Amino acid sequence: MTTRLTSELASRFATIALGHVTREYPNHILHGLEGPEDAKTPSKLHPVFYGSYDWHSCVHGYWMLARLLRLHPEMPEAQAIRDLFSTMLVPDRIAGECGYFDRPMARGYERPYGWGWLLKLAAELHGHENARWGAALSPLTERIVQRFRDFLPLATYPVRVGTHYNTAFALRLAADYADTVGDTALFELLRATAQRWYGSDTACPAWGEPSGDDFLSPALIEAECMRRLLPATDFGRWFDAFLPDIAAGQPRTLFAPASVSDRSDGKIAHLDGLSLSRAWCWASLAGTLPETDPRRPVMLEAAHGHLEAGIAHVAGDYMGEHWLASFAILALSETE
């Protein structure tokens, strides 16, 4: 991929995120009310992650800021990020977030997408320049880890859609946390679940891609999940059987960026995110192959085409602007 995460691009994306992680409205709340006393504003429900249109987008906005601060600690926005984290990632505010998750009606809240992103944020803060940020988040992190431990044994089937309910994406993000902090029991649970759900999948047709509001490729994120969780040799065998015709550019549906007809429509705007997440997956998967593998240039070309198609539209309309940059940073910083 020719686009690189320069300090200038990092500064641009940081400015975008700083403009929305504390922007309370517009807001899309998925909130179960047990009584009239539960009818509250977003910031009353969520003392930290109330911005960015919805809870999960706010979480991965914080992740992106943490990642950019680590990679470019001298950028002009660095001090604003530090000030934000020191104000918001504090015990009393996190206690409010924990209280929300402790509500009986919140058992499945943000499952699994928001769970995965919260652990991705925790992984990024682990060993960061200010240990207090990750320490403050830890009570919420522990709750989300327990959510995974409780839920995965009960989940007989995966969810293969290209939106928030996709289970492979959540496993993929959670694996980074488990690996970073050395939680081998959690990592083994994630691995065993991935093998149970996806281990026998072969000759993926990908004929249903893209759906009209996908921001994930069900095929590619499944492959990226397995790459992250399986030993390299096991993954190589699985990948060869799962997408056997990559060298011939098949399934063709995985190689062409989606057309986006209306970026003011939040669902249609998801398709820009599909381009960015596909770029991340294609590049990451290509990195497992030797230089001489005929699939490698095909996959890297697909990664480049998808990245350029998506990154041009990170900003402009708030329906995309409140979240797309995070997926651009996945593509730019997870595969370099």
Image (cartoon, rainbow, N blue to C red):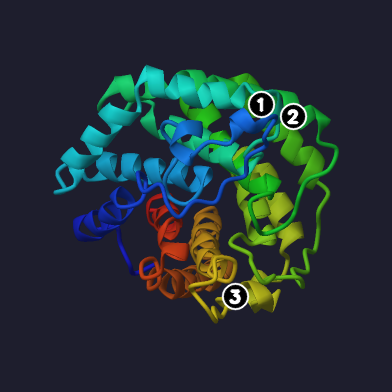
Between marks 1 and 3 in the image, the one whose residue lies nearer the viewer: 1
Q: Up-down: is 131 above or below 73? A: above
User: In this figure, which residue is indicated by the disc labeled 2?
Assistant: 151
Q: Residue at x 72, y 51 (%)?
A: 237
Q: Are marks 2 and 1 in contact (CB under 8 Å)?
A: yes
x and y percent of residue 332 in the render? 38, 57
Q: Secondary structure at mark 1?
A: helix
x and y percent of residue 335 in the render? 43, 53
Between marks 2 and 3 in the image, the one whose residue lies nearer the viewer: 2
Q: Classify mark 1: residues with Cα within 10 Å, few (<14), some (14-19) or many (20+).
A: some
Q: Secondary structure at mark 2?
A: helix
Pick the front one: 85 or 245:
85
x and y percent of residue 67 in the render? 34, 42
State the quadrant of the N terminus.
bottom left
Q: Residue at x 58, y 76 (%)?
A: 258
* CA gap, disc 2 and disc 3: 34 Å
Q: Residue at x 67, y 78 (%)?
A: 252
Q: Are marks 2 and 3 in contact (CB under 8 Å)?
A: no
User: In this figure, which residue is indicated by the disc labeled 1?
Assistant: 147
* CA gap, disc 2 and disc 1: 6 Å
- Left or right: 167 in relation to 28: right
Q: Up-down: is 191 above or below 245? A: above
Residue type pointed to by label 1: Arg
Q: Secondary structure at mark 3?
A: loop
